[in-house]
Amino acid sequence: MGFSGSVPGAARLHLVDGVSLLRPEEQVFDAMLAGFANQQLARNLARTTAEGRERTVKAFTAYVNAFPWQWSPAMVDEWLGDLRSLRELKRTTIRSYSEAVRAFCHFVTDPLYQWPAICEDRFGTHPVQVVHEWNTAAHVQDNESDPKKRAFTKAELHAFFGHCDDEVARIRAFGRKGWLPAFRDATLFKTAYAFGLRRNETRMLDAADFGSNPHAPEFGPFGRCQVRFGKAKKGSAPKRRGVLTVWDWTGDVLEEWFTEVRPLFGVDGNPAAWPSERGLRIGCQRLNSRFVAYRHALGLDHGVDFHSLRRSYVTHLIEDGWDPRFVQEQVGHEHASTTSIYTCVFSDFRTRTLRRRLDATVAAALKSQKGKHA
């Protein structure tokens, strides 16, 4: 072959020509996966994305008990069908699995990477694309999230934060050290709602990410929050955005945490806003377990999750009459349609809106009648 094999993921970077392999099928497949990972990393995709796709490709290979140069579309049909019927996976999960296999097939069938020639030479056949439009689900709507997912009502949110505070008091009354992590998590939950943050955005905050807003001095040193680990697009670094404080209670909550409670963790040299008892910062699993425990204690349904704090932020601002464009900028949505998906406006807001409209109509009619009789 005249090609130098210098492209990330190319066959000649992972296999030596003319060398006999002890387990040719397994070794070629492993080399394909290594090349696939290199190709994705070269595109600036996250390592977690590359690793997730590799796990999916391995799972499909194990299910069909065949190597990529033996795959067929019928195998994909059977695999995806079982995932839907037996494991009852979500539509978005099914689509991500099929996209992982599609991307892998696109990679190993591209002549630029030489895998078709390698397979033809060693196995007498070559891989083909097995994932097509006609055997995978089409992405036909913007919002494919679980319809059970929703925002907190204001009453539920008040009860949730009240329970967070009650747990801190209860644990502390027994003289246990666990009140510090409980206080930290309670403040973290309130902060996620106060600024409309995603879970990882909240978890990755540092103490230095809070600052004053010269146009709103009443919030003191907590007039804004600098988000540095926002949701990234594929191949891009995490997005940054500044979020302005809107709730009058936010400064008091953060002031108590940073001046009175956080120092008790012994955080010298630790920049994290939410330090862990054993590491730099709290992990996602700990946040999830605490949230689920509180949700269960309050009898809330599974449609309420950590992301519901962000949904609630958007919903409650819209209900209170804040400008939709301001809300969109606060939560970092590129399109207004995305913000509208997050908005779970409740019936009392619609009732008030309808009442204002009807009252305005009646007032206009009475004014018109009065003008005729004048």
Image (spheres, helix red, strand yellow):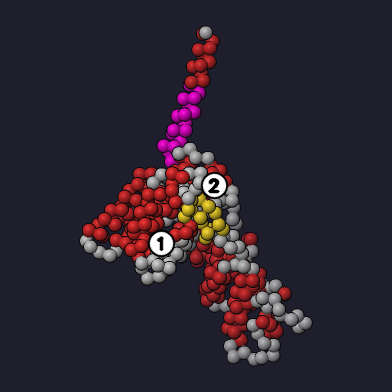
Is residue 303 inside the magenta stretch?
A: no
Q: Is residue 312 left or right of residue 159?
A: right
Q: Position of residue 95 (x, y in %)?
A: 56, 61
Q: Please identify the residue farthest to the top as the structure is shown.
A: 374
Disc 1 is placed on an element classified as loop
Q: Is residue 242 above or below residue 353?
A: below
Is residue 350 inside the magenta stretch?
A: yes
Q: Position of residue 2 (x, y in %)?
A: 77, 82
Q: Is residue 276 above or below residue 214?
A: below
| Other residues around mark 2 within 10 Å, as few (<14) / some (14–19) / many (≥20) | some
Mark found first going from the N terminus, 2 or 1: 1
Question: Where is mark 1, residue-wise?
Answer: 274
Question: Disc 1 residue type?
Answer: Trp
Q: Is residue 260 or residue 79 the one in the foreground?
A: 260
Disc 2 is placed on an element classified as helix
Q: Position of residue 369 (x, y in %)?
A: 51, 13
Q: Residue shown at 66%/69% (left/top)?
A: 106
Q: Which is in the foreground here, disc 2 or disc 1?
A: 1
Q: Residue shown at 43%/68% (left/top)?
A: 269
The numbered dot on residue 348 is none
Q: Is residue 287 or residue 173 the one in the foreground?
A: 173
Q: Which residues are magenta?
A: 345-362
For marks 2 and 1, give the CA distance: 26 Å
Q: Please identify the residue farthest to the right as the structure is shown.
A: 2
Q: Are marks 2 and 1 in contact (CB under 8 Å)?
A: no
Question: Disc 2 residue type?
Answer: Gln
Question: Where is mark 2, residue-wise?
Answer: 328
Q: Is residue 362 visible?
A: yes
| Other residues around mark 1 within 10 Å, as few (<14) / some (14–19) / many (≥20) | many
